[in-house]
Structure formats: structure tokens, C-alpha cells
Amino acid sequence: MKKITYIILTLICSAAFAQKNAESVTITYQSSFNGNRDTTSSTIVDISKNSAKIYSVGESYPGSPDVVTYIDFVDSSVYQCATLDNGQIVSSTYKFKFDNWEYTDETETVAGVKCKKAYTTINSNRIDIYYTSDIKFWGTPAPRFGITKGLVLKYVINASRVLEAVNIEYSKKSKELLPSTYGKIVESHVLQKMLNENSTKVVDIFNNQRICFDTGIKSPTSYSEIGGDSVYRFANGTIVLRKVQLPDSAWNYDIFAELSQYSDGDAYDRTGTVFVIPTDKELSYLDGLLKGVEMLPSFETKTGKRQYGKVSTEKYNVPVELIRFYTSFGTRAYNKYKYGDYNWYDSIVFHQDVTALSKYLSHEAWIGVFIGNYDRGGHIINLKLKYHPNGSGIRREVIPLFNTLNIMEMAGQSYSDFFDTDSLVVDFKINHELANVILSYISTGHGGWGGGDEFNRKPNSIILDGNKTVFTPWRCDCASNREKNPCSGNSPDGLTSSDYSRSGWCPGTITNPIEFNYEKLSAGSHRIIIAIPQGPREGNSFSAWNVSGNLIIEQ
């Protein structure tokens, strides 16, 4: 027993001696969330000569810039310093104060050191720290939360997220920690934007492109006429299309599509879609664009009308929707119209997470935008894809099944007005059993009069191999978008057209996909049926449904 006591006292004395004679110290911190520790990366804090250097080691996001934080205790300054991919050094700085904390009598031992507890609240987040004043070094791994007169060895954020010291090493050698230059000094929000842009890959697809109706526009009619990165127009100018080069290994990114749009003449709310054309089968939607919609597979309805290009087959895949959007009533072009104290939007910006469709957003792809309109001024659009590195490596299989939106409306592709007499039937095969399958489904109803499907709830029945799921697409939040719709007609009841609830869409908004989950699909043949009780015609008015669906499987 005396021997054990002697060893413990010797260790304590040795640690105290090391602290007393040290000229620098290195502390290693690791993080955890709800008790689950992340051992793949660490935060390192070096402290020497009234200064500290804070940096990370281990796994990081691909493309992340080298970022180091410095604390200068002499002039009470913190510097966040980044070296960008182009070699440029950029920093932001601020002065710190010590009086940010409420101190308590509570204690806890961290990394073998007895610590006191203090706390504060920042942006509605409770921050607890455990610090020691018994060590001659001052420092912290997270100066953004504030600095205390001591060495912080543990942070607890909202009682769930922890950053804690796991190792402390003392050295008799002092270190020069502060850099010779901080490079260009910018404000913190500017630096944050530069850091985000440094790691994000942005692909500009369309810049200030007009989508309009103009019978004078000539479209390519053969594959020999398309190529490179030119912008091509089809269907009398209502479609713009371009072949774009995209990042490799798209499954390592979170991918967002960003579309901006404003009217340059068209006053109405219009159906729009951002789409990618799969070219992995014998036929593609490109064949229809170049040679006519009759080139695409079709089915005949009970009324004798043929529906072209709306269902995938063994030799053809339908276009895959990235964004289903609806233009507003006349944003920008009609902002001259005043109504009360509304401040009309200058343009509409649509953002959509399209990560699940990464299979078709890698290497190169044909990407297009369609807005159905009959106006020569039409609409002006900008489109970009943003690839944010996440390092997940999750690969997703995508199986396009159907897309009844008549993208080639102005080139003869008919409306999908057959649901009153026919269901949409899609047969497909899979080569092996699939688990955790998602049907990503977009549905919007159209027919813009009182009895039309646009303004009346209609249940959609999705029947996969005889198993039925019912979903009613309905948006009752359309009135939230009044300031996007300067040309929306006003009614005597005090409402305007853009206020009314609709079947799955609102003017000036995106329609999000709805996901249906299936535990597994066996290898072999399958059938999916979409049944909608579409309303009858009234004179020249009719209803139609734009539905699209893809199977998505994480591999």
C-alpha cells in the first residue's frame, strides 16, 4: 500500500514539476455527440509565449481549406487565418474580453486535471466550460465562445455536444506560434463566404437565358448539330438545353440546384421544370427533341390519343426532374403595378437539394429548363449546380419510371389529360433484389377554372405490385407568396388568384417530391399504376396532371 501511495505521489509531483518548468504545452481535444466520440479527427491547441495556435488534424471534408486560429494574449486579439486553394492567405480578426462567463463552485476532473465550471448563453445555446487556473498557460480550443482567465479543457454545448481534452503534453522548449503574416484582413462574414466558396464547386449552366415562344427560332434536328457547351433551343424557344461538364464522383457531394427567374413579358403563372436527360439507353429524350416527339415510345389512351415519351421502357428513360417550379404572375416585368404597400420581388430564386439524383449529375450531362408560355418576351433564367463536399461516398441508384409533364408542349407533345379514362401504367424490371427503396414522386393538378383539378382536391393512388398508397397533393399556403405576384388578378372577395390553394403547387414556388418507402423489391418484373379521378371537360376547358417518379436506392 505504501508503495502504491509513493508511486501516485511521485506521478503527481512529476506532473507538477513538468508544468512548472514547461515553456509550452500541447493539448489534444476530441469531440463527441450524445456520448458517441469521434476518433477520426482532433483539435490541437499549442500554447507558448502569451500566444496560442488552434488547428485540426485527421479526417476533413474534401476541398476544405487550411484554417488555423491564433490567439494573441498581448493585444487581446483572435485571428482566423485561411490558406485558400489558390495560395492566398486571408484572415479575419476581433478583440476578445474575459468577462463573458458566469462562474460556479462546481468542479470536474478532465484529463487528470481538476477544473472549475463556468457557463454562458450564446445565440440561445447553453455553453458550459471546465477550466483550470492551476496551470500557468491560458488558452481555449474555441475562442469564438469567449476566453477565460485559465486553460479550458472541456466544452459542453446544450448538454449534448462535447469537446474535451484527452491528452496534455508539456515541453521545456518555447515555440513561436504566431505567423509572420496574416495575409489580407477581411471581415468575418467575408472570410466565411470565401471559405464556403473555396470548397464548393459551382457549375454555371445557364446565364441570362431567355425562355419564350418564338416560331422564328430554329432548333437542331440531328446529333451532328449539337455538341460542345453551346445553348440550344427547342419547341419554339420554350426549352433551353446544354451539355455540361460536371464534377466526377458526385456521390461525395451534397448537390443543390439554384434557379433564378423573372418575367420579361409573360404575365402568367407557368409550369416549369429543370431536367436532366438520361442517355444510358438506346433512345433518349434528345431523340424526340431533335427528330420529333413521335420518335419516343408511346401508349394509346382509351380515347385513341397517343402519349409520347412519358413512360420509361427497356430502351428509353424519361427525363429526370431536378426542380418542378412555377413562375409567378409577372415578377419584374409587371412590378409597375401597385397594390397597397407590397414590395414586389425583383426575381424568384428556387433552391432544391438534388443529391439523391447524383447518378445523373456526374461527368457530363444534358440539362435543360422548360417554361410553358406563349409570350415572345417570356422569361429570363439563370441556373447553376453547387457541389458541397461531404465525403459520405453514398452511391445511389436511380431508376426513372415516368414523367407526364409535356416538356415539348410547343412541339406537339400533348397534355396528360387522360386520367379521367386511363391510369398511368409502368412496367419495369430489376436484375436483383433491392432493399430500402424510395419512390420519389411529384404530382401537380391543372385546369384553371372553378371545376378544374387545379382548384379541387384529387387523391392520387400509387399502386406498386398491387399495394396501394393514397396521397392527395394540396397546397394551402399560396397566399404566403403574394409579393411574388404583381400581376395576379384581384377578386371582389379580397383575394387574388395567387392566394388560392391548389393541387400540389403555388405560383412562384417549388413543388417538392413526396417519398414513399418500400422495404424491398424482388428481382424480376414489377408494375406501378398511378390512378387519379380527373374531372371532366367543361367546353374548351380541361384538366391534366403532371406526375413524375423515380426509384432511388442507396447502395
Image: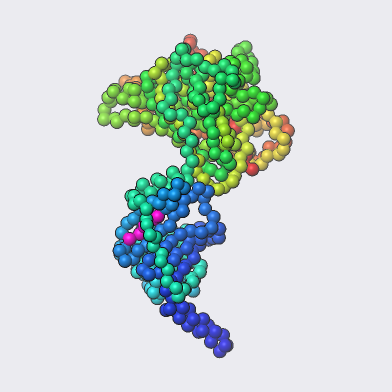
Quarter of image, res 342: top left
Q: Position of residue 101 (x, y in %)?
A: 34, 64
| Residue bounds of the magenta highlight | 77-81
Q: Is residue 450 left or right of residue 520?
A: left
Q: Nearer the viewer, residue 103 or 498?
A: 103
Q: Position of residue 551 (x, y in %)?
A: 61, 34
| Residue at screen point 42% across, 53% down | 82
Quarter of image, res 502: top left
Given the current orientation, which residue lies at the most extreme bottom position? Answer: 2
Q: Quadrant of the C terminus?
A: top right
Q: Is residue 491 left or right of residue 161?
A: left
| Residue at screen point 43% across, 61% down | 54
Q: Nearer the viewer, residue 343 or 232?
A: 232
Based on the picture, tell me whether residue 78 belongs to the magenta stretch.
yes
Does the image show residue 507?
Answer: no
Q: Nearer the viewer, residue 492 or 45?
A: 45
Q: How many marks?
A: 0
| Residue at screen point 49% across, 43% down | 388
2 lies above or below 448: below
Q: Position of residue 381 (x, y in %)?
A: 42, 27
Q: Tell me the chief SS of the magenta region.
A: strand
459 lies above or below 99: above
Does the image show residue 251?
Answer: yes
Q: Quadrant of the N terminus?
A: bottom right
| Residue at screen point 39% across, 18% down | 377
Q: Is residue 513 left or right of residue 48?
A: right
Q: Position of residue 341 (x, y in %)?
A: 26, 30
Based on the picture, tell me whether residue 294 belongs to the magenta stretch.
no
Tell me how the rendering is colored: rainbow
